[in-house]
Amino acid sequence: MAHNPLSLSRRTFLAGSSAAAAAAAIATIIPSAAWAQNRSPTMRAIPKTGEMIPVVGLGTFETFDITPGEPRDHVREVIRLFHEAGGRVIDTSPLYGMAEVNVGDFITELGITDDIFITNKTWTTGDYLSDNSHSERQLLQSRERLWRSQIDVLQVHSLENHDQVRHWLAQKKEQGSVRYIGVTQWSPEYYDTMERLVNTGTLDFVQLAYTIVTRAAEQRLLDACVANGVAVQVNIPFEKARLFTAVAEQPVPDFVAELGIRTWAQYFLKWIISHPAVTNVVPATSQPAHIADNMEALYGDLPDQEMRERMAKYYAELPGVADALKQPPYPGKNYGGVVTWPFRRPQA
């Protein structure tokens, strides 16, 4: 199979960690700061209202959790470039350490607060059945950190105490402090529960895992979302960076060049957003070069169903793909911050 010589692997794209190297990498993908001018971003409607949002957003898990006092200008630059490229949806959570603080500080400092559509989460249990005090405190904290009187989307984080919290969320939506409500979960083993909740007709959003190698959501859940008018937000689209390890220095195949796909990040993202049920995808990054790469997927043509299957088959047959997900999350990276995660390390 021939390859497009202009295609770049993620590793090549990220070569060098200095500001100069990052700038050079960005320039390789995006010739100028006005690269998005005269181009129309791919937008999707939130089914319950018809409100349009860009299909590529920004996640903050791990990447925006920075220990207070440590340098954080790089995440400010990520937000600036994201907004400049047409990005509007930022996903965060109180569970992500300092992520809410950094998002709130920088969208305020950059003067773009009114442009940003925040999808957030709540992770609460309460001291007893029907105790909403934890939820109330967490929402107040999120509003203060994000400098917001209203949260666009508030979802039950990983279905934690969802039976109680969903009723509280409905009250917050009615009162106007929350615009849309939903649930999140990254593990397909809980998709039966998510499908049941979607079928109640009370949700506006779900956030789930759906990637070129993790396709369990296609079995019933995505269809249920379409049938019930529920927006689908996709998290961890790169399988916590593990998808890139299977391609290393390999360029993307030349058969996707017609779609403007020049990197593996764009390959994976356009595959996801080409599913008609997907409303938005939120790849997380703390690297300005990454955001420049990711945001290219917001523009240009998307693969049709035949091309999607060709892309999935091509990637699945590459050497090393079968072992990619056996690696620990974020191979080669060591994120620090307020919250630490006991990720399983590979056994010798």
Image (cartoon, helix red, strand yellow):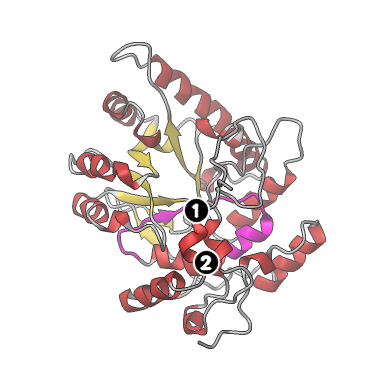
Q: How crowded is mark 1: few (under 14 residues within 10 Å), some or many (20 or more)?
A: few
Q: Does label 2 or label 1 sit earlier along the sequence?
A: 2
Looking at the picture, how far across and down is residue 295, in whole percent? 56, 62
Can residue 33 be seen here? Answer: no
In the structure shown, which secondary structural element does the residue marked by tag 1 occupy? loop
- Which residue corresponds to mark 2? 320
Task: Give the left or right position of residue 58, taking residue 47 as reference.
Answer: right
Is 276 a magenta residue? yes
Image vertical order of residue 84 relative to residue 150, above or below: below
Magenta range: 275-295
Q: What residue type is labelled 1?
A: Lys
Task: Give the left or right position of residue 319, taking residue 232 as reference.
Answer: right
- Which residue corresponds to mark 1? 326
Checking the image for residue 4, the label placed there is: none
Task: Give the left or right position of residue 184, taking residue 111 as reference.
Answer: left
In the structure shown, which secondary structural element does the residue marked by tag 2 occupy? loop
In the displayed image of the protein, which residue is found farthest to the front?
348
